[in-house]
Amino acid sequence: MARAQPQFSCTACGAVHRKWSGRCDACGAWNSIVEEAPLAAGPRAVGKGRSLTLTTLQAEEAPPPRATSGIDEFDRVLGGGLVAASAILVGGDPGIGKSTLLLQAVAAFAGRGLDCLYISGEEAAAQVRLRAQRLGLAGAPVRLAAETNLRDILATLDAERPGLVIIDSIQTMWLDSVESAPGSVAQVRASAHELVSFAKRRGVSVILVGHVTKEGQIAGPRVVEHMVDCVLYFEGERGHQFRILRAVKNRFGPADEIGVFEMTGRGLAEVPNPSALFLSERGEAAAGSVVFAGIEGTRPMLTEIQALVAPSTLTMPRRTVVGLDSGRLSTILAVLEARCGIPFAGLDVFLNVAGGMRVAEPAADLAVAAALLSAREDVAVPPETVVFGEISLSGALRPVAQAENRLKEAQKLGFTAAMLPRGAKLEGETGVALRAFADLTGFVGEVFGAG
Ligand code: TYD
Ligand code: MG
């Protein structure tokens, strides 16, 4: 029988290595690789497996039944409610509000008749009760336990068979059959595996809370992400009251859907019209500020992109970005320089999405370029104007999807004009005056008189 090989895995990204090394090849983290106890290579029956029953793709499958919490922003991110026997991972920075969100969600589900259990491995029952009191949820019919021993938790779940159980957090859970310490990759992986297979076997939905590392990955094993049906991230800036729940994987609904909340003194409040909220802090038309008409998941959302460009005293001028990809900023700066002859050398560039929102769409390119130019030339973009469009490396502007939805949202919020790439597919009248451009050079010349 083959001897079980020792196995090493990275605590930051979960990658498995055959040897120990100081740096993980997969994610680049230092000192993150630890040895894990090998899987027991017990004797295995060798022989023929049973043959599977094969079916066809053709069947009248009804959509899965869903339980809704009534918290619309939460239900939508799940794809329209909670699917029975599904496993969901909610990741986010410590302190961002995961426990608060899930306590509110579980109370809402329980209030609608779903049998709910909340297991806290991080806080004592009294602490959870205090929070429930503060949130005005003390009367909700949620059953509570503070425990980290997974064997006991599974036995309880098996006896109780609730409809939904919250495990806060997966990093605190441990199985006595696994040798490593709680919080280690091996423990988290084994615990998550046990919970997810229990969910499937017994028809109980499980929501796992997971803390995230600075790199933006759920600490320890990313393998948890593969095991579950849905991965939701709860994000936001500490200093801001906005929180965004984002679906990054959903087997039962659209990924990229977001729910917007506001952290208040009495917990998380839903934000049904995020565009209005994100733009509410906007003052008079100022140089460097541009409103981007974006799409988040299935709904349009307007956000303000702000740029500041100032002479630099550094040999390597600063490029500071919050809420956007810094690589994308470099690309746009390079296109402006190479295709439009507008250099940013010797200038510090600061770019920011207002309100703690994060924008990942390439459609934001033109809005970013407009904000940069507006800041550099000290010329404000015409007021009541939204901007969107993708910039290609050649300097051409590419039309983006859902132009009509973007324009309708802009119109709803009182915007009267839009700057966008030529060739957008528009069917009806949107009530917004359109200025379409074929390339970035044309845009720069016409709007800023530069280039
Ligand atoms: P918490 O849900 O404990 O975060 P996580 O579980 O992600 O670690 O949230 C903690 C923060 O939320 C804490 O700093 C206080 C703040 N908070 C409010 O502002 N209002 C509230 O009603 C509650 C319960 C928490
Ligand atoms: Mg917590």
Image (cartoon, rainbow, N blue to C red):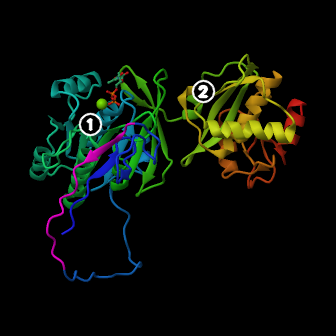
Name the residue rendered at 22%, 60% in the picture.
4
Disc 2 crowd rating (10 Å Cα; few below 14, some 14-19, many 20+) is many
Say what amino acid the circle numbered 2 marks: Ala
Q: Ligand 1 is in which quadrant of the figure?
A: top left
Q: Give how far across and how far down residue 43 sits, in percent.
A: 14, 69
Nearer-the-camera pick, 130 or 141? 130
Q: Position of residue 234 (x, y in %)?
A: 42, 36
Tell me the residue at 69%/49% (across/down).
404
Which SS class for mark 2?
Answer: helix
Would you place residue 5 above or below residue 70 in this image?
below
Say above or below: 228 vs 215.
below
- Where in the figure is residue 391, as x and y percent of width and height? 75, 46
Front: mark 1 or 2: 2
Pointer 2 residue Cβ closer than 8 Å to ligand 1: no
Q: Is residue 317 left or right of residue 271?
A: right
Q: Quadrant of residue 108?
A: top left
Could you say whether the residue bearing mark 1 is in a helix, strand or loop? helix
* Observer able to see residue 169: no
Residue 33, magenta (yes or no): yes
Residue at mark 1: 107
Quarter holding residue 328:
top right
Q: Nearer the viewer, residue 80 or 355?
A: 355
Q: Residue 354 — which label?
A: 2
Disc 1 crowd, CA 10 A, few/some/many (<14, 14-19, 20+): many
Q: Which residues are magenta?
A: 31-46
Classify the position of the N terminus by image quarter.
bottom left
Answer yes or no: is residue 284 visible: yes
Residue type pointed to by label 1? Ala
For marks 1 and 2, the one nearer the N-term is: 1
Question: x, y (%) of residue 137?
Answer: 25, 29
The chief SS type of the magenta part is loop
